[in-house]
Amino acid sequence: MSAFAILHVTSLFGGGVDRHVRDILRTVARPQLVWHAGEGVDVIEDGGRFFPLAGGAVGETLALWLRGRRVGLVHLHQLTRAPRERAEWACRALAAPRIATLHDVLFLRADAFSAQDPLAPDPAWLAETSRVLRESRAVLAPSRWLANLAARHVPGLAVDVVPNGVAPPLADQIGGNDLMREEFARARPGRVVALLGALGPHKGSDLAEAVAAALDGTDIALVVIGYLDRQLHPGWRVPGRLFVHGAFAEGDAAGLLKAYGASLVLMPNAVPESFSYALSDAWIAGVPVLAAPRGALAERIGAHGGGWLLPESFDAAVLAREIRALVGGDREGERARVQLALAQPDPARIPPLDAMTRSLDAFYARFGIDPAAPEAADAADLEALVARNLDGILFRGELVRLCDEMAQTLAALESTRKRAADFEAEARGWIAKLEADVRAVQEELRRSNEAREALAKEADLLRLNKEALDRLPSPVRRLLLKLAFDARR
């Protein structure tokens, strides 16, 4: 009989959680399904096919289909409300146990990514998430820091640490300068400091422009390998100082860091990281980091080196000062030594993907159940529950993002058109002035030629007169010269 299946329950959004789930789907040798849950939106993913569920589809028919797929364990990856509710329903309907992975600090409060103090719990919210965690057969976290945070706020909770593993990049993913944007290459600075990923305020996007301005007068530019919440499209955000590469394929991060020649990766996070794939990607590329002294960033750098921690309180001026010192400044030698140390492989520093896979599979084997007498499952059964009319709810967030991207792209295009029109107008002015200057020079040359010809004729006449004078007898010549001299007096 085939192994029981895992039902992963997560949110609709991507990021590190989605990367983690994709790694599990790819490397754990068990049947697996993913339930993407949002407010009023549910999508079941089965073997690469996506089934958006109609309203009211979460019920006995769906439970029959999931039992037919032999789901023996629910793995909850998000503690926001919709995923929590779907995971609890699945556990009841299938009589299946649940394990939960903490991927961030959202179990403390729903607005942790935007709150002034992201680690200050919302009591009502924490009461809901705590119950789900306590009722799970196992709770996992990618870092000891996050495990300790959960245990501190949920007394008596046991949390096992399973670091997020990373697969080594393929040889063709560690590319050359062909990965660099041509617009950047045309004005390439002397040195590059990178920011990595999709950067919102919780990852320090608010500081990027101020740091770029504070680096004025140096040969250092910031490059966002990814995008900012305020600029999604590739291009210069601050000419010569802050460049946005744009979105990139998973696995290309290390190659892009090498292509841009990054000397340092800056991670000025406002919200503590639970693990940070970006940190692993930077270390895979052999690039040291300068990071906020919080969460898993502080834990991993403190344990394995590979970079420096900022002071507890930092701003753009502090960041610029540290960058100036480490990149071409008086601490350049220190930075070079750290970079050299990163060239040595260390599975403790960058956990391998296969180690994570083995650990997770052991939890699945320990807590999963083998459903007895499964019903037959057919894709048609699930398709009967699929929404017939996608009214935009499912893709609303994506549509908003695409609209934002289009608006920014159109704005950038309009700006480019204006600059081109201004350049054309300026060029036409210079061309008109140049043509006028050429005409003036030509006129001056014509007058010069006429004057030269007149002088040549006068010189010929004088030469003839001199020859005639020279032929006269000497007394006559002297008399004529005296008369000419007296006439000029």
Image (cartoon, rainbow, N blue to C red):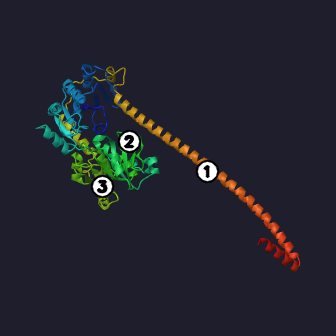
Which of marks 3 and 2 precedes in the sequence?
A: 2
| Residue identified by numbered label 1 | 434
Question: How far apart in space, not on screen, are marks 2 and 3 (Cα)?
Answer: 32 Å
Judge whether residue 74 can be spotted in this image: yes
Type of residue at label 1? Leu
- The disc placed on residue 321 is 3
- Near mark 1 (Cα within 10 A), the count class, few <14, some 14-19 or many ≥20, is few
Residue 395: image quadrant is top left
Q: Are marks 1 and 3 in contact (CB under 8 Å)?
A: no
- Near mark 2 (Cα within 10 A), the count class, few <14, some 14-19 or many ≥20, is few
| Residue identified by numbered label 2 | 249
Judge whether residue 372 can be spotted in this image: no
Q: Residue sitting at 21 percent across and 31 percent down?
A: 73
- Quadrant of the rendering where the C terminus is positioned: bottom right
- Quadrant of the rendering where the N terminus is positioned: top left
Decide if residue 428 is on the left or right side of residue 471: left
